[in-house]
Amino acid sequence: MSGGDRIAKALVRHGVRHLFTLCGGHISPILVSAKQRGISVIDVRHEATAVFAADAVSRLTGIPGVAAVTAGPGVTNTITAIKNAQLAQSALVLLGGATATFLKGRGALQDIDQMSLIKPHVKWAISVKTLREVVPAINRAFTEAKSGLPGPVFVELPVDLLYDEQLVRQWYADAMGKGKARGLGDKFVKWHLQRHVDKLFAGSEPVEDSAPKEIERRFADLAEVDQVLTRLKKAERPVLLIGSQAMLCACEMYDVAAAVEKLGVPVYLAGMARGLLGEKNQLQAIHKRSQALNEADLVLLAGVPMDFRLNYGRAINRQAKLITVNLSRSDLKKNRRPTQGIHADPGLFIIQLANQFPADQKNWRDWVERLNQRGREREKEIEAFADQKTDRINPLRLCLEINQTMNRQSTVVVDGGDFVATASYIVRPRGPFSWLDPGVFGTLGVGAGFALGAKLVKPESEVWLLYGDGSLGYGLAEFDTFVRHGLPVIAVVGNDAGWTQITREQVEILEDDVGTTLQYTDYHRAAEGLGAVGLLLTEQTSIRQVLQQAKELASAGMPVLINAHIGKTDFRKGSISM
């Protein structure tokens, strides 16, 4: 078996169904072998998209997504996406091509020191040196990606380990020359090359397949659970904040949701936890989070660090009992020392806590209702903003209509600044694992890859991709990918001809909009040129009709881009984060 065959077989054994790539001579054997073994090979138009798609697969299935990219520029093009996955704590495997083992450092095509470049941005990295190391490296990559604190890993695979041994030996024989060696120098080179190729394939006979290693989960000590339970019983105004880390295992999502229900503590959901309790749930608080955290007497952060999103811990009442549960030891105490820090899987901890929670425990109905009342008041404010006249379509009205139009099987992917942040207040995930955002890195350009991965693993779902017009520029060419692979996503671009989240503050403070202005570009026509359907939306009275048209087109198998010309509002004035 060639290296490409061995890799493909290992991927199948680890449950990989889709391989994301942009082709290159250094990785061709991987792609061909994957296809032959029934893996769907999805080729994209930029390597970052391949990694974003692998990231989405990981988040939605719990199985690390896999991307394969060619050497040199192929690897360097993934760095932003890999860093995004690292900061989002997403388990994925990046396979990177590399020049032939003997030619490293000799000026070969696309030969750079990839390991030094990528190591700071991944959890684990390895450069494979011989054929017998290929499968063990792949197996360990999956284990490293998923174990402990999840993250991306990198496996560098030189091209001479991927092709058939007979062919590779022929390459080296051709390099040695067909005539007799002339002098000691020639003889030494031939001997050295022969010795090198022998080492490449020594001991590489296929071995019996072993089952993927089971990942050990990290539970909290029962004594730690009891301590939290004691503190929770005394609390009058507890708040639970759940982040992506609590959603590492898709098989447990209903157990985590049931545990939250049993606890009866009002909860705010962030990242991949959005949608955990469905579209409407009495315990789920949507708005006024900072106010609730400031008033709470106990705050439990389940998989949420105290970074800029919580004002570095200052958003939480200084007098409150603060409990942090996290798989990252550094995040347990980042920026503020908690009352109790627990190094454990947050999702498992919530289940453990609920299992010990007494049935006759007092409830917090009045506190829950107070938060719900604030939420209803905020909803009225949003409606008032949506009713304001703007020079074009009111973006809040558009988001409200999108929320009304989405079906119960919808998955929402967001990629942008001001328009997308506005949507996050209004568009509600319908259930668990139905919301994808970049995470803490705030990366623009995730949209096409995330939507690609989501539609592949949830083909029955309506995938709504909400774009800002700035971020659309990163992934517009991927409509060609959607078309070629028959993936009917519905994209809506909030087109306000600018990088509005930046413009608003820059103009107010510096009195100059330099670098922040765009045009009302015909993005719908660009989508048409790439084979998709483009729809132009310029009238507020046509919103519902155009959205319905897009749904019908997607149901018929066509990717759609709605170019919605939106006006500007002050809804998010003063909300820029730095």
Image (spheres, rainbow, N blue to C red):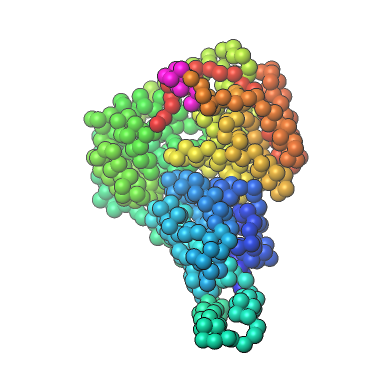
x 43%, y 39%: residue: 440
* Viewer can see residue 303: yes
* Viewer can see residue 229: no
Is 157 displayed left or right of 122 in the figure?
right
Place residue 115 in its image quadrant: bottom left
Report the number of discs: 0
| Nearer to the camera, 202 or 248 | 202
x 41%, y 43%: residue: 259
Could you tell me residue 359's position as x and y percent?
Answer: 35, 40
| Nearer to the camera, 495 or 512 | 512
Could you tell me residue 274's position as x and y percent?
Answer: 49, 37
Where, quadrant-wise, is the C terminus in this rendering?
top left
Could you tell me residue 444's position as x and y percent?
Answer: 53, 37
Could you tell me residue 286's position as x and y percent?
Answer: 45, 28
Q: Which residues are magenta?
A: 502-511
Q: Is residue 508 magenta?
A: yes
Q: Main secondary structure of the magenta part?
A: helix
The vertical placement of 485 against 366, above or below, is: below
Place residue 240 in its image quadrant: top left
x 60%, y 23%: residue: 496
Q: Is residue 157 magenta?
A: no
Place residue 545 in its image quadrant: top right
The vertical placement of 148 against 192, above or below, is: above
Q: Residue furthest top?
A: 389
Is 263 displayed left or right of 570 in the figure?
left
x 63%, y 17%: residue: 392
Where, quadrant-wise, is the N terminus in this rendering?
bottom right
The vertical placement of 515 against 67, above or below, is: above
